[in-house]
Structures are given as structure tokens and as C-alpha cells.
Image: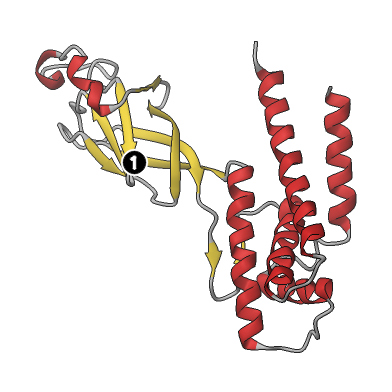
């Protein structure tokens, strides 16, 4: 099965060799979309903004398909405070752990609505002195905030948060920095399909089929990887 994954990656690599120079920013992508539909490539602010909008839509779809970009954030506890703000670019939290120089404790995810059923820990850990004793055991997250139970009994402990972040677009350069180069052709396919649809070209279906095939291949690769990693 890994042989098939290697073939898929090779096909991606072959395709990307011809496109990695012109999908580094939205301005280049706009030119490519115009070329794909046979449009005059001279600058047209109205048309360019429409294509740029489709390109950003495609970037979001590709980001979702590839599970976004893995991100890390570190926050510091405040004694008896049960919620902490984290990087708001992170749209999903997958792992949380306390760490120190030579110690690590993984927290378990538990919905806050179920915390009432958890056993209380000695007055929110008051009087606990060792590193392990004063740490929370459960977490939940929502809207850029991490919730801890029981509340930490000590200030200054570090918490490492891992999750997936949203794709970011730097507006001054219009560079999509969170989309892997290997998947950017799919964004061009999507923008081409949407623009071709807008101007009534029958080739829109062909470009959309290219985009859908690429997404299906991404999903198949991810699912295969998860299957291979299971014990």
C-alpha cells in the first residue's frame, strides 16, 4: 500500500514542478486563472478581485482537506484561574500538557458540561506542593480559551497546546503562507472553475473535476496514513 502512496506523491510532485513558480501569491494565481480560461491577462481591478476571492475560497477548502497547519502555543498558569487565552489562529485543539524541565503531564479532554461528575480534588489543590499534585487533570477549549479542571494551584506552570490553525493571508503581499506548495494547484483549479462558471464557459465542469479529484486524493492519502498508523 505504501507503494501506491509513493506513486500518488510522485504524481503530485510532477504536477507541482510546472506550477510552483506561479502559485506563490494571489497575483500570480490571478494571471494563471485568466490564462486557463483564455482571458486577456491585462490588469482589470474588478475582474482580478473576483478571481482573488475565488482563490481564497479554494484555499480555505484545501486547508480543511489537509487538516490545516499544525500549530503550537505555550501559555502560563495563574493560581486558581481555570481559563487561559491561547492563539486565536488555532481553530482546533488536539493535545494539552503541562511541562517543566524534566516532567510532562498530558491532560485529558473532557467536555465542561461533564465536569460536575468529576471528583473534586481537595479544595482546588490548595495545600498541594509537588509539581504533579498541583496540576489540573482535564481540559476543554472554546473560542480561543482553554478551560482547566481542577484550576491550577500554582502560578507560572507552562502549558503546551497543540492543534490546527486557520490559513492566514498576509494582505500586503497576498501570500498564502499556510497552504503547502504541493496543494496550491488545487486552489488554482477551484478558482478557474468558479470564474469559468461566472462567465459561462462549458470548461468549468472540467476544472471543477480536476479540483475534486485532487481533494479526493488528499483525503485518500490522509485516511491511508491513519490506517497505517493504527496498532
Label 1 residue SS: strand
Image: 142 above or below 57 = above
Residue 187: x, y in percent?
70, 59
How many other residues sit within 10 Å of disc 1, few (<14), some (14-19) or many (≥20)? some
Q: Residue at x 70, y 26 (%)?
A: 225
Towards the viewer: 81 or 28: 28
Q: Quadrant of residue 129?
A: top left
Q: Which residue is mark 1?
A: 75
- Quarter-wise, where is residue 4 in the image? top right
At a point 53% along the width and 59% down the height, the residue shown is 168
Residue at point 83%, 24% (across, down): 2
Question: Can residue 207 be seen by looking at this rendering?
Answer: yes
Along the horizontal axis of the image, is 48 left or right of 105? right
Residue 188 x/y as whole percent: 74, 63
Residue 224: image x %, image y %? Answer: 73, 26
Quadrant including the N terminus: top right
Q: Nearer the viewer, residue 31 or 205?
A: 205
Amino acid at each position: 500500500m505504501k507503494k501506491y502512496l509513493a506513486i500518488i506523491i510522485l504524481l503530485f510532485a510532477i504536477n507541482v514542478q510546472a506550477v510552483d513558480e506561479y502559485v506563490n501569491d494571489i497575483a500570480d494565481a490571478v494571471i494563471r486563472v485568466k490564462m486557463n480560461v483564455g482571458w486577456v491577462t491585462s490588469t482589470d481591478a474588478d475582474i482580478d478581485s473576483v478571481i482573488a476571492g475565488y482563490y481564497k475560497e479554494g484555499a480555505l477548502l484545501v486547508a480543511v482537506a489537509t487538516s490545516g497547519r499544525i500549530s503550537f502555543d505555550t501559555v502560563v498558569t495563574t493560581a486558581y484561574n481555570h481559563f487561559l487565552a491561547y492563539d486565536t489562529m488555532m481553530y482546533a485543539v488536539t493535545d494539552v500538557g503541562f511541562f517543566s524541565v524534566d516532567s510532562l503531564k498530558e491532560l485529558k479532554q473532557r467536555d465542561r458540561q461533564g465536569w460536575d461528575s468529576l471528583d473534586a480534588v481537595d479544595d482546588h489543590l490548595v495545600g498541594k506542593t509537588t509539581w504533579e499534585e498541583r496540576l489540573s487533570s482535564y481540559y476543554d477549549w472554546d473560542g480561543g480559551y482553554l478551560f482547566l479542571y481542577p484550576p491550577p494551584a500554582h502560578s507560572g506552570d507552562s502549558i503546551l497546546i497543540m492543534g490546527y490553525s486557520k490559513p492566514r493571508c498576509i494582505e500586503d503581499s497576498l501570500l498564502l503562507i499556510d497552504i503547502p506548495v504541493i496543494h496550491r494547484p488545487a486552489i488554482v483549479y477551484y478558482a478557474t472553475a468558479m470564474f469559468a462558471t461566472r462567465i459561462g464557459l462549458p470548461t468549468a465542469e472540467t476544472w471543477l473535476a480536476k479540483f475534486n479529484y485532487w481533494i479526493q486524493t488528499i483525503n485518500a492519502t490522509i485516511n491511508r496514513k491513519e490506517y497505517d498508523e493504527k496498532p
